[in-house]
Image (cartoon, coloured by chain):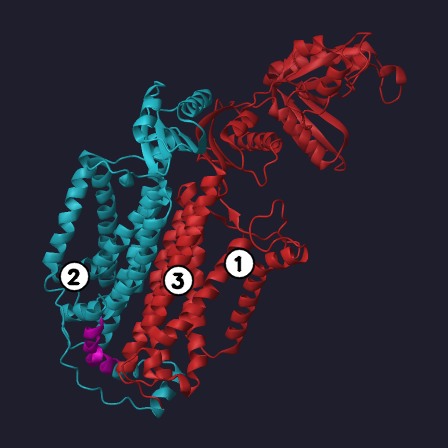
Chain colours: A cyan, B red
Amino acid sequence: MLDPADETSGVSAEPEEEAEELEEEEPEEEPEEEEAKAEEPEPKVEKAPPRVRRLDIVGRRNWFFLISLLIIIPGIISMSTRHFLLGIDFAGGTEFTVSFASHPNVTKVEDAVSGMNIDGSVISTGSGGYIIRTPPLSPAAQKTVEDGLEKALGPMQLQQVLEVGGTIATETIEFALLAVVLASVGILLLLAIRFRNVPGGWRAGFQFGGSALAALLHDVFLLTGLFSIMGAVLGLRIGQIDSLFVTAVLTVVGFSVHDTIVVFDRIRENLRVSQRLSFEQVVNLSIMQTAARSIITSFTVVLVLAAILIAGGATLKGFALALLIGIISGTYSSIFNAAPLLVVWRRLQPVR
Amino acid sequence: MQLVLSWPIRLLIIGLLIFSVGVDGAGYVYRAVNKYPLVGNVPNLPPNYFGWPLYIHKGLDLAGGTHIDYQLTNFPAGQSRADVQQRTVDVINKRVNSLGVSEPEIRGAGSQNDRITVDLAGVTADQAQRAIGRITKLVYAKWVPDDKVTGGPQPGYKPQLVGLTGDDIQSATPALDQNGVSWVVNMTFTSHGGDVFSKLTQDNVNACPGDPSLSQSANCAGRHLSIWLDLTQKDIDNWENPDYVGTVSRPWDAPQNATDPTPKFLTDPITQEQITGGQAVISGSFTQATANDLATGINSGSLPVTLLVLDVTQVGSTLGAESVKLSLAAGMLGLTIVVIFMIVYYRLPGFLASLALVFYAGAVFAVFKALPVTLTLAGITGFILSVGMAVDANVLIFERFKEEVRAGRTIPAAVDAAVRRAWPAIRDSNTSTLITCVILGFVGPAQVKGFAIVLGIGVIASLISSIIVTHNLLAIVLASTRFRRPALLGVDRARSS
């Protein structure tokens, strides 16, 4: 997984050498660095080893765009036609999380619930644990349900009772949308400011910012779309959205941009030092140089999330899965979408 | 980045390290000194660090407890919504006190000041709703003679309801009197209430005229108007029973047994003169706290708004403990995997980065305890993610370091160049995350805010840990040529000079 990127880093030899030449002309060069160079002149760089295999990611960009669209478009269709499977804190209602000492099977619990005329649904969480969801119940009715269950199925431990009206959901979603929009604007501006000193000025800055934003929206749509498919189309419980899912989406927004900025930063640096290469070549080179880091970082986070997904509690599983999808998508989009998109944009709107 | 080898920076880091170890260690010292078990939960342990309570504040999803969102409706016209909300929060606080919850959190929310959220650790939803939702009605009573009465505020007299209730009161606020010396409670009546009150105070004065502070004959029971919460005719019918009166006449916020009658007494001031215009002042030997209590008591019986329950979340303590265990296990597992990976893949730098990571985790937890930050499940995930970001900054530097060595730099020069060149990417990417955190912290829903704060603190600490701590550790270790070996540094080859 890590090898190809590692191998290709030999490619960096050429521009690196030029970097040294150029940097010496820069006035803000730190004096310490000058000293270091004075006493140790850079050795002749060995010729690039032939083992380098260079992946032409930018050249095959349309394939990568296609792959993304193939996942995102069904997701968008699912979102617009089937919407989402709503978690309790969005759907409203009452949810009991209980565990029975007698470890009854699902049918028994379902029988007990339907015997009480409360229109409840039962989900097993393993080892005698069940989640029972009903339309909103008054505290008195809740007590009746609890007593009824205990009477039918023996000693019961009540772990959690959630009771939610519908209003909170709309607000949470509105807040989250507002946050995503504001964060997007903030990130666009940040990148435009940071990248305005590449050749092309502000226009180039906004090209960088816009491409990063597109990759970010890619991740948001991919994640929400997949959850819509899992929850609303396939009916999987893990695909239901709740306020933790909203948190996950917002985290992915932060993380996705991380990867993109690292690639873009390399492009900025390489643009400065290697004017012999075409923009496309610079972008491809920069992707190759940063891919190892992007994959390694995501890999460590993926390991942690996979641990939570496999071993973590039921409440955290959906959250961990959302983060997992989002982070993999974020790494993919920064390597295969954001930078190639920048190339496309440059072609449509040349800055030099 | 002139941060390496500069001693002020290193001293700062050492200082931070000692502080964070101190913060983390203080709890253990306290336990050791007081002979508590070093680990595990000790009930009622007062956590202290030089008198500063320091410990991890657990959110409800970890500690177990009840969360309720209330919607306030029927706001009275002509009063500031923010004021009404604040009075309601005070009243709920007071009511919740009877539950003996540690650190109840009752906050106003909603863009129109029309929400109140309540977080109570270790309380069931049922208990919480009973305590908060208890409808109390303030009533005024005058005193009528009854020879058989032996107890209560006025022996020989029993109260008689006069029809003036909490509905007729607009507000009660504690304040300093005009001289700015003693505390009083200012009351404002509605216009109807003011008229009734004027009539009642006139009757009071007529009962035994004169200036009560000068003449003893002007100080009779008929000159008093008592204020009660929820006093009913049934209570008054029992007034000749001394035990019953004894309990009912205790202050309304006194602790009570479930079987006894509820204490209902608020205050029994003497009327100095007829009060017209609907503005009354209750004076006495109040401190700020007692004046506050009385005002809250009056407000409690005259809440102008209706509390509507929006949603209730009850988390069992076992589920909370389970979540803590699971997330801690996941966090430790993740950290272990990351450390192993870093050491195997990056060798010596990876080991040093892992040391920096330990520093990082200690510093972050110290900040969590000191601020304090309330940790929730989402918050812990934010922390785990920020570990990922801390690793990310290190990976950026190390990958760069390998490149610089391949490009032919000496090892010390490569370290400096790697940090310097990786810095713009680290700076920009973390700035973007911080922007997201700030936005979430301001506009995010309540659950998301805690997450944003944790992630934000984590990002800042990860910047310090990767740029300053790792870099300095590397510089110190690589000062010795013994460590400049390719195998140790995970590079193909290296110039050692």
Whether residue B496 is in magenta: the answer is: no
Q: Quadrant of the C terminus of chain B?
A: bottom left
The disc labelled 1 sits on which kind of residue?
Answer: Ala
**Residue B398 as seen in the image, left or right of residue B250:** left
Return the x and y of residue B265 as percentages of the image width and height.
70, 21
Q: CA distance from mark 1 to mark 3?
A: 20 Å
Residue placed under numbered mark 2 in the picture: A340
Mark 3 and mark 2, same subunit?
A: no
Are circles 2 and 1 on residues that touch, CB within 8 Å?
A: no
Q: Residue at x 20, y 86 (%)?
A: A46
Return the x and y of residue B113 as percentages of the image width and height.
48, 33
Q: Residue at x 25, y 38 (%)?
A: A236
**From the viewer's perspective, is residue B33 above or below residue A289?**
above
Viewer-side residue, B220 vs A327 = A327
**From the viewer's perspective, is residue B195 above or below residue B64?**
above
Helix or strand or loop: what does disc 3 sit on? helix
Q: Which residues are magenta?
A: A6-19
Residue placed under numbered mark 1 in the picture: B366
The disc labelled 3 sits on which kind of residue?
Answer: Thr
Within 10 angstroms of label 2, few (less than 14), some, or many (20 or more) residues?
many
Q: Residue at x 60, y 29 (%)?
A: B95
Chain to which mark 3 belongs: B
Residue placed under numbered mark 3 in the picture: B336
Q: Nearer the viewer, mark 3 or mark 2?
A: 3
Q: Quadrant of the N terminus of chain B?
A: bottom left
Q: CA distance from mark 3 to mark 2?
A: 36 Å
Return the x and y of residue B397 as percentages of the image width and height.
34, 72
